[in-house]
Image (tube, rainbow, N blue to C red):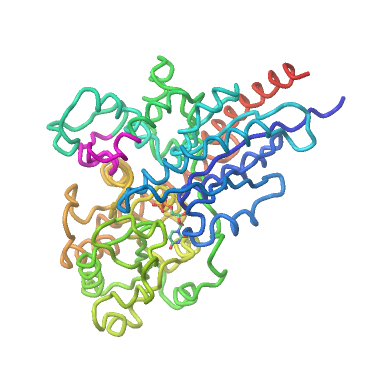
């Protein structure tokens, strides 16, 4: 008989490396499955800030993934201090008409009339779920973070309704089934100020998640067993759409932007096994001037080898680098390091400007620890490389991740237990670095990292939990595509 046309999946990635990179990995798996073609949709807004994403990235994807870019929408009416969440969600909202046209005109290459089998926006793009509902296309949210963070977001409309104080002043931790109790102050950053427009955007977004047919979550059983089991019960009871734990999707090589052989890799080649601490705060993480000086002094005092991706400091915004931290600077971020630091640490440490090929760095045999903002992609990349972490959350849902990684999973140490307000002093930095690299707690975290690396590989083995979950979603999409193409003919 005639082969049925491949069903088509439209994936929508919000601005930012932390969204575009894992969405590209999802696109790769969707077409590798064999029965789908895919379009990866990105936004023109902010795409130039992201170190060569997404155009360089697209070049690395198989031909059955096509690219579409939604045209730039104006944002000049937003206040200069608008948070990244407000900016991203405003782009998503203002792009809805363009996205509607794109979805309505999408059909698989060669026609076939099947239309779109599934629409898959990420956690910010989920604002667009009303469109899939309107067009009768199944909508699945790709959660680029963990299930516990998603669960805490889903819970915010209820918190918003039942409390009046700032979440940071909640007298009791938030207890969600299967999740580590979360202090109000550890809930996602944009929810910490009820007066900020980002707060309302996020509460509204959380309500829209309920329009989804399911959540595709970049997590796996060994990482979040209890949270996954508890969420299953909730969705069976109809409280939330089902969650499919299909991760970890971590890149196996860095792509986009940087040259294949960054000088830091050659430097790592000269260092002993597991001797180097890698310090990097994701695509957006930014330290204050004072914190940058304390971190530098602490690294120097620890005596341990380090590789530090240095950004321009900002005293206003811990996510300033997200939109291109170099903006407005004509000099070099390394010039903001303490006087003489680079010279004094020569041979022991290497500071690089702005960006490193992180996947290659983490999997280098010389790297033994990772000071991280706990962005979820960075976390999964550390897992894939078996490297333990020092949790240094800065923005977004990173405190949720840090709590989970330190208190439940055991992959990360926290320089100060659960109190990371204010500046972390040089003494605290030096002590935490030494504990991670050569202390007993560091050894336990390293052992955990090794276990998780194996479990992550098993999750995608033939009978692995994540592979099965992915097959289940693909099965739903195929069913929907079959129904739609019958309807069309
Ligand atoms: N990244 C990188 N080099 C850098 C900084 C970041 O390759 O110097 C990549 C990193 O490997 C990860 C992504 O950018 O894949 C950042 O995503 P994450 O979720 O960790 O943090 P976000 O940037 O979204 O806060």
Residue 320 rendering spot, x and y as whole percentages: 34, 58
Residue 332 rendering spot, x and y as whole percentages: 37, 76
Residue 282 rendering spot, x and y as whole percentages: 39, 57
Residue drawn where x is 20% and y is 37% of the image: 183
Answer left or right for 413 relative to 201: left
Residue drawn where x is 24% and y is 27% of the image: 159
**Pick the front one: 178 or 164:** 164
As drawn, the residue found furthest toward the top would be 237
**Pick the front one: 368 or 243:** 243
Residue 226 visible in the displayed image: no
Quadrant of the snapshot with the N terminus: top right
**Pick the front one: 43 or 351:** 43
Residue drawn where x is 35% and y is 73% of the image: 333
Provide the residue span drawn in magenta.
180-201
Q: Quadrant of residue 400?
A: top left
Residue 267 visible in the displayed image: yes
Specify whether residue 188 is painted magenta: yes
Q: Quadrant of residue 219?
A: top left
Residue 399 rendering spot, x and y as whole percentages: 28, 45
As drawn, the residue found furthest toward the front would be 77
Answer left or right for 237 relative to 130: left
Q: Is 305 drawn above or below residue 238 in the view shown?
A: below
The quarter of the image that holds ligand 1 is bottom left
């Amino acid at each position: 008989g005639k082969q049925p046309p491949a069903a088509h999946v439209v994936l929508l990635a919000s601005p930012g490396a932390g969204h575009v990179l894992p969405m590209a990995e999802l696109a790769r798996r969707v077409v590798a499955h064999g029965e789908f073609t895919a379009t990866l949709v990105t936004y023109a807004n902010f795409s130039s800030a992201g170190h060569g994403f997404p155009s360089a990235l697209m070049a690395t994807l198989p031909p059955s993934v096509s690219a579409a870019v939604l045209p730039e929408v104006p944002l000049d009416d937003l206040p200069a201090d608008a948070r990244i969440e407000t900016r991203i969600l405003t782009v998503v909202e203002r792009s809805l008409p363009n996205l509607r046209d794109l979805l309505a005109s999408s059909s698989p290459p060669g026609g076939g009339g099947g239309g779109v089998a599934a629409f898959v926006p990420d956690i910010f793009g989920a604002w667009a779920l009303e469109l899939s509902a309107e067009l009768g296309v199944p909508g699945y949210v790709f959660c680029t973070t963990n299930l516990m963070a998603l669960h805490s977001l889903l819970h915010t409309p209820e918190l918003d309704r039942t409390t009046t104080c700032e979440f940071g002043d909640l007298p009791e931790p938030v207890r969600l089934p299967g999740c580590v109790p979360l202090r109000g102050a550890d809930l996602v950053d944009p929810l910490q100020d009820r007066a900020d427009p980002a707060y309302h955007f996020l509460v509204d977004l959380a309500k829209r998640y309920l329009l989804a047919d399911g959540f595709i979550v970049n997590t796996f059983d060994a990482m979040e067993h209890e949270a996954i089991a508890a969420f299953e019960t909730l969705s069976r009871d109809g409280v939330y759409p089902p969650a499919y734990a299909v991760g970890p999707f971590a890149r196996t090589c860095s792509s986009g932007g940087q040259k294949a052989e960054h000088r830091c890799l050659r430097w790592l080649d000269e260092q002993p096994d597991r001797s180097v601490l890698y310090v990097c705060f994701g695509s957006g993480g930014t330290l204050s001037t004072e914190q940058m000086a304390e971190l530098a002094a602490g690294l120097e005092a620890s005596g341990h080898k380090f590789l530090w991706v240095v950004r321009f400091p900002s005293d206003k915004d811990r996510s300033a680098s997200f939109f291109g931290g170099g903006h407005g600077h004509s000099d070099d971020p390394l010039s903001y390091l303490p006087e003489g630091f680079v010279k004094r640490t020569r041979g022991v440490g290497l500071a690089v400007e702005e960006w490193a090929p992180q996947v290659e760095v983490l999997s280098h045999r010389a790297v033994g620890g990772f000071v991280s903002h706990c962005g979820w992609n960075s976390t999964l990349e550390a897992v894939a490389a078996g490297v333990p972490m020092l949790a240094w959350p800065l923005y977004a849902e990173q405190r949720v991740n840090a709590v989970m990684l330190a208190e439940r999973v055991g992959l990360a140490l926290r320089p100060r237990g659960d109190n990371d307000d204010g500046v972390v002093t040089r003494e605290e930095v030096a002590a935490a670095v030494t504990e991670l690299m050569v202390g007993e707690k560091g050894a336990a975290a390293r052992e955990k990292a090794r276990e998780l690396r194996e479990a992550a590989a098993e999750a995608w083995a033939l009978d692995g939990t994540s592979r099965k979950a992915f097959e289940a979603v693909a099965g739903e999409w195929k069913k929907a595509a079959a129904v739609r193409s019958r309807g069309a003919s």
